[in-house]
Image (cartoon, coloured by chain):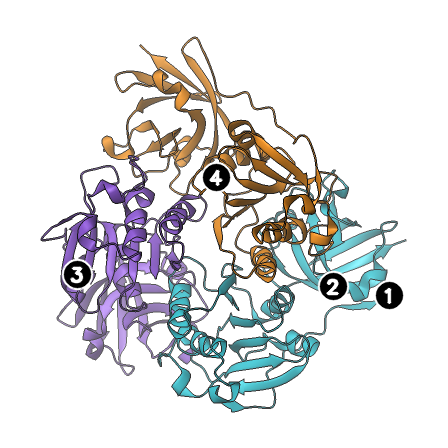
Chain colours: A cyan, B orange, C purple
Amino acid sequence: MIAFITDWGTDSYYVSSVKSVIKQINSKEEIIDISHNMSKFNILSYNHIIYRVSKEFKEGTIVLAVIDPTVGSERKAILLETKNPKYYFIAPDNGILSMVSENYGIENIIELNNKKYHWGNSYTFHGRDIFGSCAGYLSKNIKKKYLGDSISKIVKIDDKMPHLKDDILSAKIFYKDSFGNLETDIFKDYHSFFDKKYNYELFIMDKKYKIIFRDFYNEDDNQKLLMHFDSSNFLEISINKKSASEFLKINNYPTFIKIKKVF
Amino acid sequence: MIAFITDWGTDSYYVSSVKSVIKQINSKEEIIDISHNMSKFNILSYNHIIYRVSKEFKEGTIVLAVIDPTVGSERKAILLETKNPKYYFIAPDNGILSMVSENYGIENIIELNNKKYHWGNSYTFHGRDIFGSCAGYLSKNIKKKYLGDSISKIVKIDDKMPHLKDDILSAKIFYKDSFGNLETDIFKDYHSFFDKKYNYELFIMDKKYKIIFRDFYNEDDNQKLLMHFDSSNFLEISINKKSASEFLKINNYPTFIKIKKVF
Amino acid sequence: MIAFITDWGTDSYYVSSVKSVIKQINSKEEIIDISHNMSKFNILSYNHIIYRVSKEFKEGTIVLAVIDPTVGSERKAILLETKNPKYYFIAPDNGILSMVSENYGIENIIELNNKKYHWGNSYTFHGRDIFGSCAGYLSKNIKKKYLGDSISKIVKIDDKMPHLKDDILSAKIFYKDSFGNLETDIFKDYHSFFDKKYNYELFIMDKKYKIIFRDFYNEDDNQKLLMHFDSSNFLEISINKKSASEFLKINNYPTFIKIKKVF
């Protein structure tokens, strides 16, 4: 199984080019599209997204993640095999695998530099020529070591969020879904900060909003701004049947926020 | 075959989570996406859409329809087996299966309450944890009765449209396609009302438009507003090579309309 | 393998109707979506797109291309088998196969007029009833000659671009990808016109822009307007990490351009 995510959109044929190459290498391999339409986020956002979505897949899945703003530069193309759970991430070495490497542990890193397993040598379509091609060969049980040289570390991005100080939790919103629900980087570690019996204030830029904590969207039907821990155990900001992103006028990701408990 | 429709958009990874679960339960099962991008319509619109699209599929197809604005509330998750044709609808019991139950007849209804066949127990991701999971098990020929308790009826919505009185046909537009063609709930029962030799007036809100009846889009190349019965035998309002929805400034679905025959 | 492209959008269920028919005819056949979201381009643009994307697929692929603004009119439905490489294009005979026929050569043309291999006889859904259905039967190795009558020629569109005169190259932009990169019809034949050591001027409508030639996007990180030959050997106009289409305010395709070398 190859789980495939890019930021290429579905208004071009690029995604199909990669699938065509994979199927030419391994016609039996199943490819599931994660998404190609999660806007053009930066590395910081995709670092979270790739971590969160990878958990939805079975161990052994090849996660082909081509978010590659610096294609054509010196950045490496890599295969990261994680320890627990074991996944195979094929991606540019630009920081988007920081969270998975920290949370799952690193078993192996291969730089995908063996041209024998590349499909072509374009300057700008590494998605097809390197990442897609190597994913195809890996799915066909080509030994990892044939794909290139072992390397000892990956590029990591510095992402210190979230942190709690004096009853204020600083965090970020790193994407919105199509309902306008806002996904934060606040994991269940901070569960004890949230309680239905308290009120909260949400600070975004220079604005302040009242917000409540609930178990799910529909618990209050009165369209207040609310927070809940979603199905992947991250805090989500939403309004029942309305778009929180529109209400809060958030268009850029990540957006930095502060949440204050009101006693 | 599982035919899969949601209103989740393709700018999130939710659809892939459900597919991942289905494939983990039954790796051989084929999943066809109906659409995940038909806006956030209300129940009244999806009731029509699910009926119309289901006819495109072979008998025995599992239609996984997760339009679920009240996820997390008391609404049931159900499997509806229809009589003729035989289909298996897996959906929230919120009214979206009203038309298929009336038109195809009800063979069986199961409340999907056997947690043994759920994937998880999130508050808000029943698409993955209940609907997708049960679709996977059903496709693997798990007996229906194992999925939960038999129940005797489903929630139905009251949808009296269309109706004809004094040469005025009252009806509704329940969605537009990406060309801006407008789909109505006027079925071929009303075929005799329409004739190429008459003129018609279309009333939307407080506006009135001239409109003609034709066999297909291209019959007149002069960009008039026209009506025709489309490939699923429902009346469609369109303008050849133009967007009727833009011309008529329709943004909400359903929109109620009246059509008057002019002698 | 069927590679499937339409201009229907993914906000309707039409694409799934065609897939359902193909799978009912040949349940084993793999279908890869090229795109259904490349806007509503005209024939001139899709003529290029189909040529460019077809090269991404293996010989023998069935390219199902339903861009059909005149559905319901007298235009034919055809199967075009090309010579080198051998592909099977199933499409309306409206000019969109001009470039593939010129570049690959014509082996056979069949008018898809044998109703035995049609799925239905709607006026407006030939995508399902003729094109999709015949693609399904062809994939199942039904003999081509059974699908209809041999004909001797296809409709071709007159597309004289690009041409070079007095150090000015006249050409067109025929689509943008979701990054806002602009794809031109300038193929590598004109490679010698471009050189990193010269400066260039780009003329669009009555506006003039400075533009440079580079090997790839990322070579200059200073967000100048630049041109490079992309992975399919056509000239692309882009701005590193920015949208060239927004910068140049291009919304219609094709858009005619001139590029002047400055000594």
Residue flagged by tag 4: what amino acid is it? Ser
Q: Quadrant of residue B259?
A: top left
Q: Give the labeled residue for mark 2.
A: A186
Asked whether the residues under marks 1 and 3 belong to the same chain, the reply is no
Q: Percent x, y for residue C228?
A: 32, 74
Q: Is residue C224 visible?
A: no
Q: Residues within 10 Å of mark 3 (few under 14, many from 20)?
A: many
Q: Earlier in the sequence, mark 1 or mark 2?
A: 1
Q: Give the labeled residue for mark 3.
A: C101
Chain to which the residue tagged by mark 4 belongs: B
Q: Give the labeled residue for mark 4.
A: B54
Q: Which residue occupies 60% across, 49% down?
A: B138
Query: Answer yes or no: do the residues labelled 3 and 4 have beta carbons within 8 Å?
Result: no
Query: Answer yes or no: do the residues labelled 1 and 3 have beta carbons within 8 Å?
Result: no
**Mark pair 2, 4: CA separation:** 41 Å
Q: Give the labeled residue for mark 1.
A: A166
Q: Left or right: B124 with respect to C44?
A: right
